[in-house]
Amino acid sequence: MKSSMTGTVDPRKLQQAESIRAEDSHHIFEGGGQCIAALTSLIGTSRRRLRIFSQHLARQIYGDLAVVDALSEFARSSRYAQVEILITDSEPLLRQPHRLLPLLKRLQSRITLRKIQPSSEPTDWEFAIADQRLSLSVSDHLKWNGQYRSDDPVRNAKLTDVFEQHWLAARPDPALRQFVL
């Protein structure tokens, strides 16, 4: 940012521009509508790999038409696009129709769903990560409050470690297999 008269950098304008960029890369959301907007933004910005860690793919968020369409578009965007979904409970998915189930069936070569095996350590994680920089984490899954970070490789790496540890022990859910296959 050069001043038009002197050709020097105005430190106040530089600091202001950097703070705007920092705010753009870190967004706090409150409520289901803002969570859906942040999630569709994350999915739409993703290029190769998208990972979702959810309790039971809550209908109000993951069953939203905008989210399902974004997932469908991402999964079909490239032959390298890959979606991995971990859930802790499949019962809510099976009780009532869910918009994701037909998508999982149609794109089963691109979207993999696994269920975490019961353990002594309960988890209440709810997050999505993409590529090496994007992350969305829900701090309150009842009110759907959380953070979306569009450029945070450190946070992404930490969440990736959590995801991969659980992914290794997770298995396809036999109860869901009849709907997906």
Image (spheres, grey):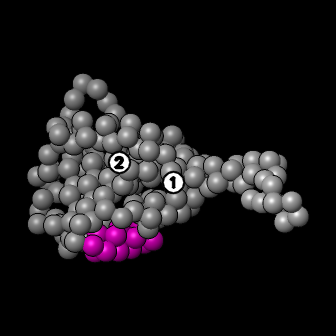
Judge whether residue 65 is colored magenta. Answer: yes
**x and y, in percent, of residue 81 in the image:** 27, 66
- Badge 1 element: loop
**Main SS of residues in magenta:** helix
Q: CA distance from mark 2 to mark 1?
A: 19 Å
Residue at coordinates 36% horizontally, 55% vertically from top-left?
131
Residue at coordinates 50% horizontally, 51% vertically from top-left?
151
162 vs 24, left or right, is: left
Judge whether residue 47 is colored magenta. Answer: no
Q: Please provide the residue range marked out in magenta.
A: 64-78
Rendering quarter of residue 119:
top left
Q: Which residue is mark 1?
A: 150
- Badge 2 element: strand
**x and y, in percent, of residue 18 in the image:** 68, 50
Front residue (pair 96, 115): 115
54 vs 153, left or right, is: left
Res. 49 in view? yes
Q: Quadrant of the C terminus?
A: bottom left
Kind of residue at disc 1:
Ser
**Structural crowding at the residue carrying mark 1, measured as other residues with C-alpha within 10 Å and reported as few (<14), some (14–19) or many (≥20):** many
Kind of residue at disc 2:
Ser
Image height check: is 140 above or below 72?
above
Mark sitting on residue 54: 2
Residue at coordinates 43% horizontally, 50% vertically from top-left?
133
